[in-house]
Image (cartoon, rainbow, N blue to C red):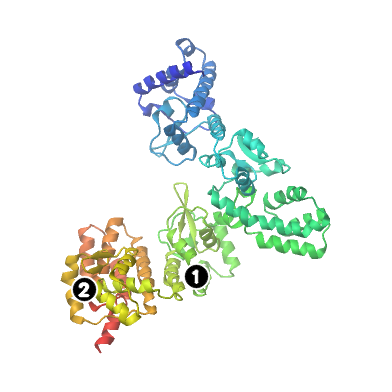
């Protein structure tokens, strides 16, 4: 399509777009296949829209099949010109449709032009790109403007080690940072393989076998970020180096070794002895060396991302077994186990040698408790697990580990896999997660911040004196001002305030009581436990309200109000009832009592501002 034809097309397109509503363009159902397959499925009015955009009066009178062929040709030519124009709105829409991200709306021009098509699923619009237009789009996306990439060959090799046959769309998703012309691909020894009408990149340095594409249309590819691919390459390379060092005495050619070892180890999951036998046969290994090969393979087995699994390792590929048949009403370990596939449940019962699901629940819970008490997991890993509740599963390593051990589960929500952390396991994590900080030691700056947290509001000069007398810390007011800034502590007049307190509240509810007492709690290293308590309380609070419909704004207001009531040592039950009533939040009496119980379990150990940092328990001893 030359420039004159393209301008004529643009004018007709805009004219037709003004004449039709987009509802006219919705297909009766999703149509799979090439552009011509979709053209044949259009109703008379939909076909007429495309005819008015692309065909002359004479061409409109052609027989159907001739007309379809002509439209197919003209739409593709126009599509190429539109892609080459590199309009961000157009390309962004195509990207969104391509990745099936559930768009609320698309650029209308793309529908009128016949580049994408709409269909309905449960009264919600979905969009598709015909297969052959998609290939055109991917092909053009690879012929990108020249950008200097960080070592393009390394990037391609990272993808190759992860996938073997690299789907073009995976490379496309990195187009902003990793652009490749066809010439560059060839320069880096990568060629394009067409398999079932789709295109894949292959490293031609490695001999290709058709078996590497077995089941490729069913592979569920995991798309990761660049750094993840790079980290994997760094982690997996020592496997090949270690094996090469075992066989190099046989005067093996380095290139020949990698041609043999890479596909043998990465293309599919094999029995370790089978791999060991292949090495022994090729390199005439002794029994001793064979044993060393097996040992190395065993160490790396769980790390390898197999091509046949779409770039997933063994654990990632097996998470399908932990997808629940449906989302349980209660997020308990027992209710999750009951929603597992019958075969998976039976396997677990046999594996743990228990009689039934209840016994399985008991032994799994006992195992996780033991692991937590013995600090089996890193603090950061547990923190990550808690943050994934009801979030989409993205193959995070820590979450995958928990799913693999049957401590977490997955359920499908609108074609997305989401994570369930059973509430009894979540609570056990909450009870243990912050005990990992027991060996921390207070820094000089920690003393400054803790005194503010323990007192709610404190005069600067009083704090300066206490630091000098109790801890031999000689801070200036200016130095303390800079320290508290990092904790979002407010400086108002001559005092430091916690951020949710106002001067009015401080002068009415806190300061008069503090001055009457005149004795301040002296902070020690043990008081770092305050942050442990606060984080645990916050998690339990959050956990409780995950079961009740409440807005984020109401939740934060309620949490802050409760913390204030605890800080000034005032009753909170009446406030809770009024808050729920005023905000039309429905809560059963049993749930209300559960919430009161959570607060009561912490309130006597939290520092009380009007007691100058002493908790209720400490203050009762102080009074005696």
Q: Which residue lies furthest to the top in this view?
A: 58
Q: Earlier in the sequence, mark 2 or mark 1?
A: 1
Identify the mark at residue 147; answer none if there is no mark.
none
Residue shown at 80%/52% (left/top)? Answer: 252
Identify the mark at residue 365; answer none if there is no mark.
1
Residue 283: give x, y in percent of width and height: 82, 55
Residue 613 visible? The answer is no
Residue shown at 31%/82% (left/top)? Answer: 469
- Examine the rendered structure and indicate whether residue 348 appears above or below residue 17: below
Residue 556: give x, y in percent of width and height: 29, 60
- Residue picked out by circle 2: 570
**From mark 2 to mark 1, how far is it between C-alphas?**
38 Å
Residue 454 visible? The answer is yes
Residue shown at 26%/83% (left/top)? Answer: 619
Q: Which of 121 and 580 is in front in this view?
A: 580
Task: Look at the numbered disc 2 and give the secondary structure of its residue.
Answer: loop
Task: Look at the numbered disc 1 and give the secondary structure of its residue.
Answer: helix
Task: Tell me if mark 1 has few (under 14), some (14-19) or many (20+) residues whose alpha carbon lies within 10 angstroms of its own.
Answer: some
Q: In this view, does 547 lie to the left or right of 63?
A: left
- Examine the rendered structure and indicate whether residue 317 appears above or below residue 511: above
- Examine the rendered structure and indicate whether residue 39 appears above or below residue 350: above
Residue shown at 84%/57% (left/top)? Answer: 284
Residue 19: give x, y in percent of width and height: 35, 21
Task: Tell me if mark 2 has few (under 14), some (14-19) or many (20+) residues whose alpha carbon lies within 10 angstroms of its own.
Answer: few
Q: Nearer the viewer, residue 490 or 7?
A: 490
């Amino acid at each position: 399509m030359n420039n004159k034809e393209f301008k004529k097309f643009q004018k007709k397109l805009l004219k037709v777009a003004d004449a039709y509503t987009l509802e006219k363009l919705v297909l009766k159902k999703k149509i799979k296949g090439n552009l011509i397959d979709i053209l044949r499925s259009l109703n008379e009015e939909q076909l007429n829209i495309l005819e008015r955009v692309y065909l002359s009066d004479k061409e409109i009178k052609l027989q159907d099949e001739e007309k379809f062929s002509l439209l197919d040709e003209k739409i593709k030519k126009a599509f190429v010109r539109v892609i080459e124009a590199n309009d961000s709105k157009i390309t962004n829409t195509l990207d969104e449709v391509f990745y099936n991200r559930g768009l609320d709306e698309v650029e209308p021009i793309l529908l009128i032009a016949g580049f994408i098509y709409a269909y309905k699923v449960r009264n919600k619009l979905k969009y598709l790109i015909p297969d052959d237009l998609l290939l055109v789009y991917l092909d053009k996306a690879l012929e990108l403007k020249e950008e200097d990439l960080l070592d393009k060959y390394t990037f391609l090799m990272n993808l190759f080690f992860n996938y073997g046959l690299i789907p073009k769309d995976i490379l496309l998703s990195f187009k902003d940072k990793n652009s490749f012309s066809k010439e560059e691909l060839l320069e880096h020894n990568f060629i394009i393989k067409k398999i079932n009408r789709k295109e894949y990149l292959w490293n031609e340095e490695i001999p290709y076998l058709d078996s590497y594409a077995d089941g490729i249309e069913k592979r569920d590819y995991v798309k990761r970020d660049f750094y993840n691919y790079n980290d994997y390459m760094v982690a997996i390379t020592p496997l090949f180096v270690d094996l090469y060092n075992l066989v190099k005495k046989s005067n093996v050619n380095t290139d020949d070794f990698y041609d043999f070892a890479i596909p043998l180890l990465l293309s599919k999951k094999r029995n370790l002895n089978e791999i060991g036998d292949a090495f022994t046969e090729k390199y005439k290994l002794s029994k001793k060396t064979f044993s060393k090969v097996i040992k190395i393979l065993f160490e790396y087995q769980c790390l390898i991302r197999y091509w046949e699994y779409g770039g997933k390792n063994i654990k990632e590929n097996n998470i399908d077994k932990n997808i629940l048949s449906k989302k349980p009403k209660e997020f308990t370990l027992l209710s999750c186990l009951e929603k597992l596939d019958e075969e998976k449940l039976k396997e677990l019962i046999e594996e743990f040698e228990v009689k039934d699901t209840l016994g399985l629940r008991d032994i799994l819970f006992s195992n996780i408790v033991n692991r937590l008490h013995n600090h089996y997991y890193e603090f950061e890993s547990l923190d990550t697990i808690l943050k994934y509740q009801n979030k989409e599963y993205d193959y995070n390593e820590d979450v995958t580990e928990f799913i693999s051990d049957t401590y977490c589960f997955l359920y499908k929500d609108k074609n997305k896999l989401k994570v369930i952390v059973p509430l009894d396991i979540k609570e056990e994590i909450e009870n243990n997660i912050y005990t990992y900080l027991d060996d921390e030691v207070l820094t000089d700056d920690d003393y400054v911040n803790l005194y503010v947290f323990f007192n709610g509001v404190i005069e600067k000069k009083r704090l300066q004196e206490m630091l000098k007398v109790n801890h031999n810390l000689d801070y200036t007011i200016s130095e303390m001002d800079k320290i508290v800034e990092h904790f979002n502590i407010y400086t108002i007049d001559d005092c430091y305030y916690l951020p949710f307190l106002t001067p009015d509240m401080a002068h009415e509810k806190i300061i008069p009581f503090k001055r009457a007492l005149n004795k301040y709690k002296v902070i020690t290293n043990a008081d770092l436990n305050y942050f442990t308590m606060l984080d645990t309380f916050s998690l339990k609070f959050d956990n409780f309200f995950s079961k009740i419909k409440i807005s984020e704004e109401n939740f934060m207001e309620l949490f802050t109000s409760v913390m204030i009531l605890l800080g000034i040592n005032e009753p909170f039950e009446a406030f809770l009832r009024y808050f729920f009533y005023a905000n039309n939040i429905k809560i059963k009496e049993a749930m209300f009592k559960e919430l009161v119980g959570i607060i009561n379990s912490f309130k006597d150990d939290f520092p009380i501002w009007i007691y100058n940092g002493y908790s209720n328990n400490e203050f009762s001893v102080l009074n005696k």
